Amino acid sequence: MADVHQLRKKVHDVQKPYTKEGNIFYDKILFKNFISSKGVRTPKTYLHITNDNIQDIEKIHQYDEFVLKPNRGACGIDIYTLTKLNPDLYQEISGRQHAWHFIDGKTRQINTIQFSGGVIIEEAIHNPKVFDQFLNGIPGICDMRFYMLNDNILFGKLRVPTIASEGYANTGRKAMAFFVDTKGIITEQGIFNNTSVNHPDLNRSFEGTKVPYWDQFTSTAIQVAKLFKLAFHSVDLTIDVTGEGTVIESEKIPLLNHFTSHGCDVMIKHLDEYLTQLSH
C-alpha cells in the first residue's frame, strides 16, 4: 500500500489540470467568483484589499461582523472571525478583543507577503441550531471536508471547534475532526491534535451520530466536483443558518496525513488502486 508521499505523487501525476481559470484552487477570490457564477453558495465577499486599494481598509468599519483572511492563505493561518463592538474595538468568536490598529496592521502585514493575493473581508456564516450538539456552548461553526474521487464522495471529515481552537474549525488550530462515512454517520471517536480521542471539551465520541443536513452537504460537494472533474480533490463547506450548503474552498491536491495515521486503510487502498488505474 502506498504511503502518504507516494499517494500525493500519484494524485499530482494523474490530476487533470484545470487551466481555464488559472490559479483557481490557490486564489480564493477566483474560486469563489467561478463557483458562484455556476449557482454555488459561498460566503459573500465584502472587500478584497490589495496593495492597489490599501485605502479601502477604512471600509472595514462598515461591517458589524465579518471574516478577515488571506486570499491565498492555508492551514487556518491569519483567519479571524470578528464582531465590531465599536469603531475602535473588535472581538473574535473566542471573546479575545482587538483594537482597530490590530485589524489595520494585520491587513497591511498580509499584503506585504509575496503571493498573498491580498486580504478578503467576507460574510461570517452561522450554522443552524442543530449543530449545537457538537459545540455545547463553544463558539464557532462546524464544517465538512469531503474527499472526492471525481464527483463521488470517498469519505468526509466533520470539523468541530474546541476551546483550544478558539472557536475555529481548522484542525491545524486544534479543532476536532470526526470521520464520516458516505451515509453521513460518524464512524469513530475523533481526532484531536493528531490523536484519536473523545471530544476534549465534551468527553464524547459522537460515534454513530448522523451529521445534520447530510443531503445538503453532499449535494453541494458533488455540485462543485462536477464543475472541475478532477481525479481526486477535497471540498470544504458548511451549512448556513437557512440550511443551504455554503462552500469555503477546494484543494486540488489535499493533504493526506489523517488518511495514513487513523484507521483509513480501506480508503487508502481504494484511493491507491483508483489512482493506479488512472495512470495506465
Image (cartoon, helix red, strand yellow):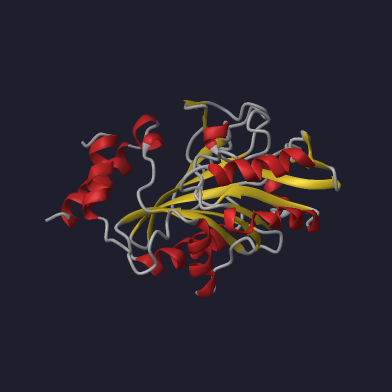
Q: Is residue 115 above or below residue 24?
A: above
Q: Quadrant of the N terminus?
A: top left
Residue at image x 63%, y 32%? 165
Left or right: residue 3 versus residue 199 is left
- Residue 76 x %, y %: 55, 40
Q: Is residue 4 visible?
A: yes
The furthest residue to the left: 280
Outermost residue toward the right in this view: 86
Q: How many marks?
A: 0
Pinpoint residue 234: horizontal percent, then vertical percent.
42, 52
Q: Is residue 79 visible?
A: no
For image coordinates 53% across by 37% down, the residue present is 177
Q: Residue at x 71, y 59 (%)?
A: 241
Q: Along the horizontal axis of the image, is 161 left or right of 227?
A: right
Is 212 in front, or is 69? 69
Q: Is residue 268 above or below residue 163?
A: below
Q: Quadrant of the C terminus?
A: bottom left
Looking at the image, residue 19 lies above or below residue 72? below
Residue 19 at what x, y percent from top left? 32, 65
Q: Where is residue 260 shown, x and y percent of the image?
A: 34, 33
At horizontal 37% and vertical 30% (from top left) the residue drawn is: 261
**Which of the 4 image quarters holds residue 166?**
top right
Residue sitting nearer the eye, 46 or 88: 88
Q: Quadrant of residue 237?
A: bottom right
